[in-house]
Amino acid sequence: MAGLVMNDSDRSLQAAFSVDPMSPQIDDSTAYSSGVSAVEHVLLVISNRRNWVMGIIAGALVIGLILTFLATPQFSSTARIEILPDSPIATNVEGQRDRSLINEVAFYNTQYSLLESESLAERVVRAGNLTVDKDFAAAFGLDHVEAGMTSDQRKGLSNSAVRILLSNLSVSPVRNSSLVDVSFSTPSPQLSAKLANLWVTQFVQSTIDRRFAATSDARQYLESRLSRLRENLEASERALINYSTDKGIVTISSETDTSGRTQNRTLVGSDIADISAALVKAREARIAAEADLSNSVVGSAQINAPTLGALRQRRAEAAAELAQLRTLFGEDYPAIASLRAQVATLDQSIQSEAARSSQGNREAYNSALRRERELQRELDELTAKYNTQQRQSIQMAILQREVDSNRQLYEGLLQRSKEIGVAGVGPNNISIVDRARPANGASSPSLPLNIALSLMLGVACAAAAVFLIEKMDNSVRDPQEVVSRFNLPLLGAIPELVDGDVADAILDKKSQIYEAYFSLMTNLSFLTEHGAPKSIMLTSSRPKEGKSNSSLSLATVLAATGKSVILVDADVRNPSINRYLDVPNKRGLTHYLSGDDRLSEIISPLDKFGFSVITAGKTPPNAAELLGSERMGLLIETLLTQYDHVLVDSPPLLGLADAPLIARRVEGVVFTIEANSTRTREIGTALRRLRMSGARLFGAIVTKVGARNHIYGYGYGYGYGFSYGADKGEP
């Protein structure tokens, strides 16, 4: 360990030569690494605070056990329902699919919130009549409704029941499904099952009621709109009929095209169509009669007439027979004379019939011509009337379009109203899958779970407590922090003395204390060109930081090297050197400072330790005046003529002016800091006072370095340094 201490001292010396002791204090945030990993740091901190950690964890476990045994057993019952989206969207388009998923997530989150809503709880309270349910009131210590209660009291009981239901409700969606579990935990298994079933039943019913309420509002709105549209349609139809009546427009039929426009067929239009067809036929008849008349003029009518044809046929036969007889007989033959008379008669008949047929064709032609002219005249009249109606039908078309528009609006709204009515009675998208059953055993409290939770809570509280304690503890735990925090070289780290007195321990050259102060003495020998400083004052920020022990131990170590050393106890307000060395304190420093020049009488040689000592003497009423007088400086100068080193054990700095007054009389000051105890602010204030007094600060020593400082490489390692090289049989 001696080697380890020397290494630390070497680093401190390098800092001492590179840092000006008179420079101002540096920021506390200056980084310094102790070379310890974060995990090791945490473990060692827990080890140092193990009493806190074990106490907090044990307390948490005890509290958890007490709460577990005192808790009322709870029985849980679960009902399962299925919630399906109203209109699921199936699409392969990426954007639409993402929008569908977002809508579905929002839908399910809405349903979960509705399952935990206060309105549903109020509905359950009313449906189950829980305010008068004795089992419910007994399970939760709730007053049941009585006959003499006011409305405010009844409302208060209802609100209490609602809060109880919500506090004991648990809604748990089943992962990757449309199922939702609704659970209730109460002191009664039957009551838990009853509440769970009542809750899901009312949720399904409330969904149906909301749907009917929504469609009812829509229906009411549509009915009011339908009423206005019906009135508008009737008014437009009435205007259309009145206009057509006033203008004499008779509509036979109406046709609606694909665009929704109505085409009306009027009586005049129908008559024009009929007259036009008749006119065409009359014209055809007139043309045929005219042709017949022309044929009768040129003689073709006789050929074509049936009677003339028959007469002509008979004449041809008679003429043929006459010609045949003439070949056989003469003209006087009676048969020939008879045939000639017959042929003549037939010729007269043919001429008479031809004349009569020609007269009939002319009459037919005249009749057809008259018919055609009459139809043409009637068509002209109807066309004129139709043209007049066409000009009048512009306004009628406007009225007709208004009728068509009103009819389309009315029919569309009527169809929407019917659809809403059908949707209101459609199937519900929420159904009950499993109803709750009374539980066979209690679901809580669970002893293993509560122990685990208590342990976790205890560990968390212990970690938080240790963290806060470590953060609030701004004392020096790593001796090397004096370099980064206070801009002071580290001259040595002194281990904590567990057993015995420092005066006895320093005499053992194999002890940790001796090795530590020997390292301190070695570091001091590097501070000046003439070796260790001739006059050194040891001080601290507050009492009981190991200042006097350090003075005594350093004097012993210096004397062991063959130097003549004297130790002056300048802590006249609270002297301690005389107690440590067991020497009388009848005459001492205060006597010399008061004017007594018998210096030899106040010096006490200590053969056991190898140095001399001047005790504090009697406590004066004006300690600061004595210590700040010129005789203090004269004393140190006089002692330096007789001794190699003068060590001054001064009072602490905080609240006293003694130490700054003494510091100006010595070559330099060694500042003592107690590890794990003295606050940073106290040390900073003390050092600031020393620097303001003009004192030269050699550096600092950290005392009472113990097991808590193992993490920084101090405390534990000393044992290794003093046992290294010893015989195996020695302890």
Image: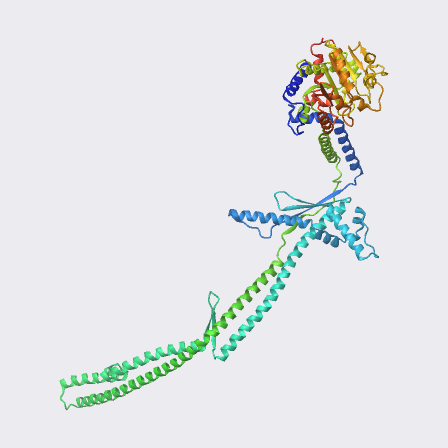
Q: Is residue 529 above or below residue 96?
A: above
Q: Residue at x 75, y 50 (%)?
A: 162
Q: Is residue 514 left or right of residue 300?
A: right
Q: Is residue 282 above or below residue 496?
A: below
The image quadrant that residue 666 belongs to is: top right
The image quadrant that residue 22 belongs to is: top right
Q: Nearer the viewer, residue 103 or 600?
A: 600
Q: Is residue 262 above or below residue 295?
A: above
Instruction: Give the percent coordinates (x, y) of residue 609.
Output: 78, 11
The image quadrant that residue 323 belongs to is: bottom left
Q: Is residue 510 visible?
A: no
Question: What is the number of callouts on the image?
Answer: 0
Q: Is residue 60 visible?
A: yes
Question: What is the quadrant of the N terminus in the image?
Answer: top right
Q: Nearer the viewer, residue 645 or 50?
A: 645
Q: Residue at x 50, y 80 (%)?
A: 246
Instruction: Give the percent coordinates (x, y) of residue 441.
Output: 75, 40
